Image (cartoon, grey):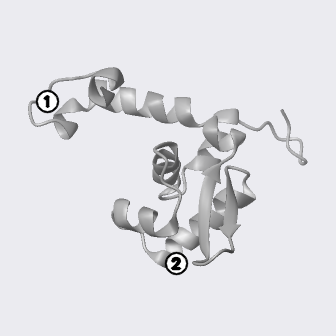
Amino acid sequence: MYSAKGMILCPVDNTFKIISKKFTILLIRNMLSNQCRFNQFLETIPGINSKTLSARLREMEKNGLIRRKVYHDPPLRVEYFLTEKGLAAKPILDQMAEYSLKHCSSVIFEDGKPRTLQEVVH
């Protein structure tokens, strides 16, 4: 894999550039949990504000991770959905969660005991 300038591109770095912007992973996580509205994101993602959320959603749409659907019947509303490309990030998020549950359990759980993702989800 080469760029236009003949430099080798790293696929890991490329993926990181797409999903590493602040809040992108959390937006994907929330969409995987069937959240799809702007105000839902504002309410459930600590530290995000309207301006940043708007910018991130536009970037995600530009990168093909999400699609935006406008419903014109009153009241007007907009919902966001993961595309196939966005849905393909689920295993990445699952692995990130597994890593943290296993190797950073003292930060996540009061008892500090490692757990699997399946234990936490069920």
- Residue 11 place in picture, x, y as percent: 70, 34
> Residue 7 at what x, y percent from top left?
82, 41
In the image, what residue occupies the spot 51% across and 72% down? Answer: 52
Residue at 70% from the left image edge and 39% from the top image edge: 84
- Answer with the quarter of the image where residue 69 lies: bottom right
Dot 2: what SS? helix
Asked if residue 91 lies left or right of residue 112, the reply is right
Instruction: Tell me: residue 114, above or below residue 40.
Output: above
Q: Which residue is mark 2?
A: 51
As measured in the structure, the alpha-carbon distance from the residue carrying label 2 to the one carrying label 1 is 36 Å
- Name the mark nearer the viewer: 2 or 1: 2
Secondary structure of the residue carrying tag 1 is: loop
Q: Which residue is mark 1?
A: 112
Q: Categorize mark 1 by other alpha carbons within 10 Å: few (<14), some (14-19), many (20+).
A: some
Near-viewer residue (29 or 39): 39
Q: Where 85 sits versus 39, above or below?
A: above
Q: x, y percentage for residue 83?
A: 69, 45
- Residue lying at the far left in this picture: please name it: 111
Mark 1 is on which residue type? Gly
Give the amino acid at mark 2. Answer: Lys
Query: Residue 10 at x, y = what percent?
Result: 70, 35
Asked whether, in this view, residue 75 is left or right of residue 114, the answer is right
Q: Would you say the residues marked 2 and 1 are in contact, meaning their CB atoms lie under 8 Å apart?
A: no
In the rendered image, the vertical position of residue 52 relative to residue 13, given as above or below: below
| Residue at (52% x, 63% y) in the render | 37
